[in-house]
Amino acid sequence: MRGPTHVAAGAAFALIAHNYAGIGDDPYLLTAPSIIGALIPDICHQGSTLGRKIPLLSWGINKTFGHRTITHSLIFLFGITAFLKYLVPQYPIIYIGMFIGVLSHLVLDALTPSGIQLLYPLKMKIRFPIYTRTGSMIEYIFFFSLIVIDITLIGGSFKIT
């Protein structure tokens, strides 16, 4: 999936977590780290939003692990959450938001033909039976649907029941 789709999904996951699970006092404070978390797993790809901003780090991770391996795994999801919980224990909104964002990224990339190595270092790829190619018309429709969900949930006028 493209960076903008990951951003929209990270926001949607955070807003849903806030509105329906009561996570976080402020939806905006939860959404910010979730959006960052939604982009971080693609640091392993030099053409990604973050990969272009931090090319040396992106290159190093890609050379060491490859694309959609460790950064698209449960090890990464729980590892980055634990690291942030250790680093900023007084701000759970940061590590919870990051967890939500990384999780959203993993879900979206499992909707692509390549899938993800969720159980890395096992080579087994995980993907949903229904999937779409990155940059396809389906992804664009999905992206705009996420934007509508984001705007609706930010407005607070709609709740999924």
Image (tube, rainbow, N blue to C red):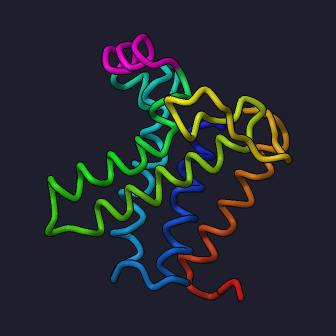
**Left or right: 96 in relation to 42:** left
- Residue drawn at point x = 59 percent, y = 56 percent: 9
The quadrant of the rendering that contains the N terminus is: top right
- Please give the range of residues in magenta: 55-66
Q: Which residue is nearer to you in this view: 24 or 82?
A: 82
**Left or right: 74 in relation to 110:** left
The image position of residue 69, as x and y in percent, is 52, 28
- Residue drawn at point x = 45 percent, y = 16 percent: 62
User: Which residue extends farthest top?
Assistant: 63
**Residue 132 sits above or below residue 121 on the image:** below
* Residue 37 located within the stretch drawn in magenta: no
**Left or right: 138 in relation to 13:** right
| Quadrant hosting residue 59 | top left
> What is the chief secondary structure element of the magenta stretch?
helix
Number of residue marks: 0
Q: Which residue is nearer to you in this view: 43 or 135?
A: 43
The quadrant of the rendering that contains the C terminus is: bottom right
